[in-house]
Image (tube, rainbow, N blue to C red):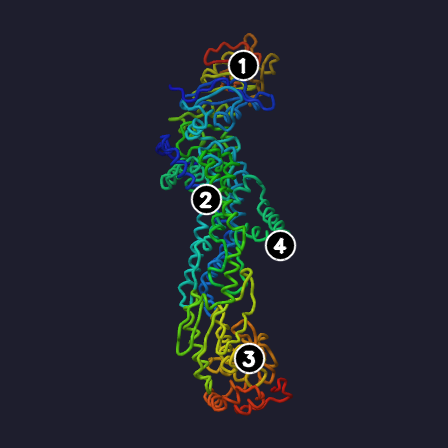
Amino acid sequence: MNTTVSAAGLTVRYGGTPALDGVTLSLTDGVTGLLGPNGAGKTTLLKVLATAVPPDAGAFTVHGEDPATPAGRLAVRRTLGYLPQTPGFHPDFTAFEFVDYVAILKELTDRGGRHREVRRVLDQVGLADVRGRRIKRLSGGMRQRVALAAALVGGPRFLVLDEPTVGLDPEQRMRFRELIAEAGEDRTVLLSTHQTEDVAMLCNRVIVLAEGRVRYDGTPAGLTARAAGRVWSSTERAPGARAGWRTGTGTFRNVGDPPTGADLLEPTLEDGYLLVLDTEDAKHADGTDGTEVAAA
Amino acid sequence: MTTTLVTKPEPTVPADHDQDRDTASASVVALAVFEARQLLLQIPLLVFGLLYLAYVGYGLFGRGEGMDAYPVLHDVDRTTQGGPELFAVALLVCVHRAALLNRRRGLEEQFGVLAMTPARRTLAHALSAVPFAVGVAVLVDLQFAWAALRPGAVGHGSLFELAVAPLTVLLAGALGVLLARVLPHPAAPLVFLLAIGLVTSMLPGGSGRHAVDWLWPVVLENGGTSVPGELLGRPAAWHALYLTGLTVLLVCVAMWAAGGRARVLKAAAAVALVAAVAGVAGQAPGDSAGLQAARKAEADHPAKFQTCVERAGSRYCAYPDWKGWTVDWAGVVHRVQAEAGGDAATTRLTVRQRIQEITDLTTDATLPTSSTPGTVTVGTQWGGNRVPEFAVGVARVLVAGSEHASLDMCDARVVTTMWLALATDPTPTDTFRHLRIDDSLSGSAAVLTSDGGSMSVSAQQTEVVRELFREPHDTVAARVKSHWQELVSPHTTTAEAARLLGVKTPKGPDDCPAG
């Protein structure tokens, strides 16, 4: 698959503290999940790729356009849909007006065509019935869908979504997954999330970021495979486990290096993620499926 | 929740870089239209817009009688400027608020990654004032056209004066946007306006005052009477250039503050700066020596500048702008003269239009009284009270011989004058009251005359005049003509006039004994 977004050595420092530390990656069409703990640099990476924040070092291209130049930046922005972590709204606008406003800022100039496009994306996110309602009268989930519609309007080829499912109930989250999956069918979607199940269900690729560095870049299956043979069940918390918690059945689920004869369990993506985040474990990474970068 | 399957979107963003400029311009216009629509929903703009509409509507449909039926167009043009001032202030506040909205809602970063740059968004905010300026221009033109189409309209308006109101609205929009970019606080517009008002009100008068006054968008200079257009001395064209240049300059600075660095922006700013400076330089000097000399010449020697026409045996001399009114003047002269007796009924009069020598357009003073026999002075306003005032002016010349000779009238001639002036008026008593400065119908009072001065009418004369209007017109008219010589004699008292005219003699001492 062709590379659509390519970044090398992206570095951003906030007051000397690196938020991104030499991130190198490349994206293709489809949904790529971006996982990482709080403070890992996910939002900073998304802001950089969305041209909201210029990198202190490094470079990247989107569809071959270099945003370091004004012309390139404009070209990138014309292909971009960006849903920030906490999207803002004009509460007195209707849903239609708000998305229409964003469409204008995306330089959709033909009024008739623009209005058709706005109706299309509002239909797509399931807000056709409330498009004339003021945003201040919409629920939190509906507002989030308005924000997604604003990101989708104009058919951007590169969609940057920063934790779009935060605060949504399970039904809404499921609806969002459908929308994101649909969006990823013909464009590049970079989805930052804390929800490993989002990644498991949606993404054909996952990048794990920690302390501003890429810890894992590969398939979700590969990340899950990192935990193969390293998840086990026990009646007591295992002292050698990197992580362990009591499950609903009353037994403990442990992740780490199991003792001999342990009752091994089927690993999940979250297990792999936890292991990749673990500094000691990362040092032993062998990159079976996907690229792992050893922690410093 | 239901899933809606939809077709894949067609990319609607521009792909061809050659179309970048067109696309960017079109998107600025699209955003300006969007913002203008949002502005329409702003309460202050709605309120002041409706107030302005009501003001214009009242001017168009609620008036039209009296002096409004005889507009002087080179005065009417600038009276259109004051109406939308509050609307412009409301627009300034609302545009400022709209330009700050994304910032207030924390959307700057979110929208900062969209294709339209902040500088172009700033331009769109400024352009959102254009529909309102166009609306104001339409209303201004409507006001002026309404006045110009009146049969009594005289003079010529100035396009530059008519442009001031819409330019002021544009300037307000530009100022609102600029303040949003450099003073991003909701109270900034009002604080700014208060500060400007305070500073300018504290500036001393003097020769430099004119230049400072003309820095304001609207300089009405109302209050005085009309003068010929060539004596106005208003630098309307320079002022329009100044407003245009200033507006464009403010927009350019706002775009600069928003990050705009395009060459075309720098070029536009440079041109606008030159235009604004040229406008200021052109409007600053004030009245030239030549203009002041012309004002003095036209006031002191009106005959040199007027054209005269003969109508029914009398001569009517008017400044070129006012020659259309000579028909109305002749109508009054004919009506008044028809009530006179003796030689006065056929005396050849000269009606001479006069202006006072003005130092500025707010000067309002009485005209010089003519000592030339048979000459009646008329001003530059007509309609309403000016008509009976002129009738009094005509009558007193017929009775006393000249305006100067009528100044010390305090006898039967005052009664005769008032009768001649108002005898054929459909509501003589009401008109008599309106002519009196205190709007009374008893006691002594001054009666206004066509030169802007007044004529004293004593309490007894008032009583006799009032009684005359109660009598049948033809009866009194016949008595006036038959006793004409006595009634125009300075030796006839008010009481004797009453007796001659067949009304009861006023009681009490004669407060104006014949000399």
Tell me residue B248's x, y (percent).
48, 43
Left or right, residue A115 beside residue B223: left
Q: Quadrant of residue A81?
A: top left
Disc 1 on helix, strand or loop?
strand
Disc number at residue B205?
A: 4
Mark closer to the chain start, 3 or 4: 4
The reply to whether discs 3 and 1 touch (Cβ–Cβ < 8 Å) is no
Residue type indicated by callout 4? Gly
Circle 3 or circle 1, nearest the eye:
3
Residue under label 2, please give it: B127
Nearer to us in this view, A44 or B120: B120
Left or right, residue A150 beside residue B186: left
Disc 3 on helix, strand or loop?
loop
Mark closer to the chain start, 2 or 4: 2
Specify whether disc 3 shares its chain with disc 1.
no
**Rendered position, B218 above or below A172:** below
Spatial CA span between label 3 and label 4: 40 Å
Residue type indicated by callout 2? Leu
Residue type indicated by callout 3? Ser
Nearer to us in this view, B349 or B160: B349
Q: Quadrant of the N terminus of chain B?
A: top left
Q: Quadrant of residue B180?
A: top right
Disc 2 on helix, strand or loop?
helix
Asked if residue B262 can be seen in this view, the reply is yes
Q: Chain of mark 2?
A: B
The reply to whether discs 2 and 1 touch (Cβ–Cβ < 8 Å) is no
Residue under label 1, please give it: A232
Disc number at residue B406?
A: 3
Q: Chain of mark 1?
A: A
Tell me residue A228's x, y (percent).
49, 13
